Amino acid sequence: QVQLVESGGGLVQAGDSLRLSCAASGRTFSSYQMGWFRQAPGKEREFVAAVSRRYGITIYADSVKGRFTISRDNAKNTVFLQMNSMKPEDTAVYYCAATETNSASRNQALYDYWGQGTQVTVSS
């Protein structure tokens, strides 16, 4: 198993940047594809970005492409989400998740391990 703890959330203004971190402990971090998801008030949880375990291949939701960057540091057992040019619609609880599937995925049903989430609020 792997345990995930997110940090870095907070209150920012539209146009600002924020970097989220997700620290992993337990089984070998490099065994997992990692993803970020978010859930806004009154909405279902949605995919944001994912990064593959070995070659760092990344995929993004269209709504964040060009503004957000996911990366990982396997030596530090950490995955990051750099968020730039933030918008009020980015306001949500952000979760990191881990899966042992063969590739990074947008499908949250494939992720077995989840963090507790960190709140991100973007004011206009």
Image: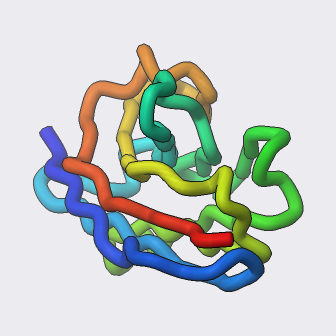
Q: Quadrant of the N terminus?
A: top left
Reply above or below: 37 against 10: above
Q: Position of residue 112 (x, y in %)?
A: 29, 26
Q: Quadrant of residue 70?
A: bottom right
Toward the viewer: 122 or 108?
Answer: 122
Q: Quadrant of residue 11?
A: bottom left
Looking at the image, which residue is at 50% across and 48% down?
36
Looking at the image, which residue is at 57% across and 68% down?
122
Looking at the image, which residue is at 60% across and 45% down?
50
Reply above or below: 64 against 86: above
Would residue 19 be found to the left or right of residue 32 on screen? right
Q: Position of residue 21 (x, y in %)?
A: 39, 72
Q: How many marks?
A: 0
Would residue 91 be found to the left or right of residue 48 on screen? left
Q: Position of residue 12 (x, y in %)?
A: 54, 80
Looking at the image, which residue is at 29% across and 63% down?
6
The outermost residue toward the top is 109
The outermost residue toward the front is 124
